[in-house]
Amino acid sequence: MTTLVIDIGGTKLAAALADSALNLTQRREIPTPASKTPDALQSALAELIAPLVSQAQRVAIASTGIIRHGVLTALNPDNLGGLSHFPLVDVISRLTQLPCMAVNDAQSAAWAEYHALSVDITDMVFLTISTGVGGGMVSNGKLLTGTEGLAGHFGHTLADPLGPKCGCGRTGCVEAIASGRGIASAAHGDLAGCTAKQIFAHAAAGHWQAAELIQRSARALARLIADIKVATDCQCVVMGGSIGLADGYLAQVRTFLDEEPQVCRVPLFRAKHQHDAGLRGAALLAQETAV
Ligand code: ADP
Ligand code: BMX
Ligand code: ZN
């Protein structure tokens, strides 16, 4: 059985075909449209999957946002150009005429990364540091999605009560400081208007402000991870997303985490499936639930 897998992020949309051994082929990627209207997202998704649909028998989607009963509700609509509501499974089922399931992107990636860990690990947390900061939790070998799909949305826990306002309505969320959007929106002077990717390039070239912005993100992440260890007693934390995977970022988070008391520290790993963790997790979940 071939699964068409789709990953919807705040910056990019990815799709591929997954065979029953979870090998991904024909991976494609396009930018996420920045528009409040559901039509723009629907058209972009149609364009993305068009060359793949006829080769698949089912669809599995990993998407940013709270996914409940197949509907995407943004916790932070700013990450999707203001779009707050999208009937994901209905739209994709109509476009493809195939059975379809959907799960949050970080929860999906957590499931894929959990399966890539050694068998003695039963409790882990995955964090994506990308457009936003997302998370997924595996406890006693089970993926936790919560009663309403909200479980693991660690990006919306408090980093700094005096920090910037977050698009979710709270103030000082980890996401408002540590995410790609958070890093970019704090940039000023010659870095104003730069993307997080450009800020990382400036930091690598020795730009002082750029390095500070990345450090501020890594420090917020380390504090979040210490909070997660205290709350869940997980055996490890796995980091993904383009910022989580960026050169030197994990090492900085580890350095800040080492400043926390021993009891709050936890082994930190880079996502084994890198940018494909969401896609692979969706394929795995579709296989397990026999969509
Ligand atoms: P999505 O949020 O759509 O899943 P990504 O995981 O690629 O997508 O995260 C997008 C964020 O990561 C953006 O803020 C972008 O500027 C930043 N980014 C992309 N590539 C890199 C890179 N190589 N190094 C650092 N940051 C990056
Ligand atoms: C936000 C939230 C999460 C998501 C996380 C990472 C929205 C639209 N998304 O916290 O559901 O998991 O961002 O998403 O509210 P990404 O786009 O950075 O991959
Ligand atoms: Zn928030």
Image (cartoon, rainbow, N blue to C red):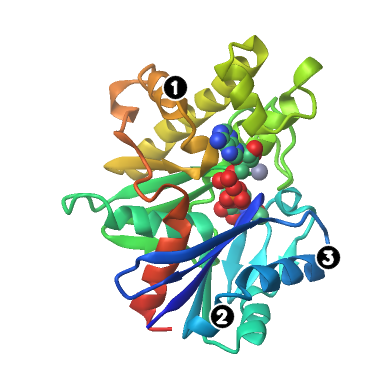
Residue 85 coordinates in the image, percent (x, y): 73, 66
Using the image, determine if residue 22 lies above or below residue 259.
below
Which residue is at the front of the view, 119 or 34?
34
182 horizontally vs 242: left or right: right
Quadrant of the image for the C terminus? bottom left
Q: Between label 2 and label 1, give the one nearer the viewer.
A: 2
- CA gap between label 2 and label 3 equals 24 Å
Q: Confirm if mark 2 falls within 8 A of ligand 1.
A: no
Q: Between label 2 and label 3, give the one nearer the viewer.
A: 2
**Residue designated by label 3:** 37
- CA gap between label 1 and label 3 equals 38 Å
For the question of whether residue 43 can be seen, the reply is yes
Q: Amino acid at mark 2?
A: Val
For the view shown, which residue lies furthest in the bottom direction? Answer: 97
Q: Residue at x 59, y 32 (%)?
A: 178
> Label 2: how many residues lie within 10 Å, few (<14), some (14-19) or many (20+)?
many
Q: Residue at x 69, y 75 (%)?
A: 87
Using the image, determine if residue 190 lies above or below residue 196.
above
Which residue is at the front of the view, 155 or 206?
206
**Residue designated by label 1:** 252
Which residue is at the front of the view, 240 or 24?
24
Q: Quadrant of residue 282?
A: bottom left
**Residue designated by label 2:** 53
Q: Residue at x 28, y 50 (%)?
A: 123
For the view shown, which residue lies furthest in the left direction? Answer: 120
Residue 63 coordinates in the image, percent (x, y): 58, 62
- CA gap between label 2 and label 1 equals 41 Å
Quadrant of the image for the N terminus? bottom left
Specify which label sits upstream in the sequence, 1 or 3: 3
20 horizontally vs 7: left or right: left
For the question of whether residue 176 can be seen, the reply is no
Residue 266 coordinates in the image, percent (x, y): 31, 33
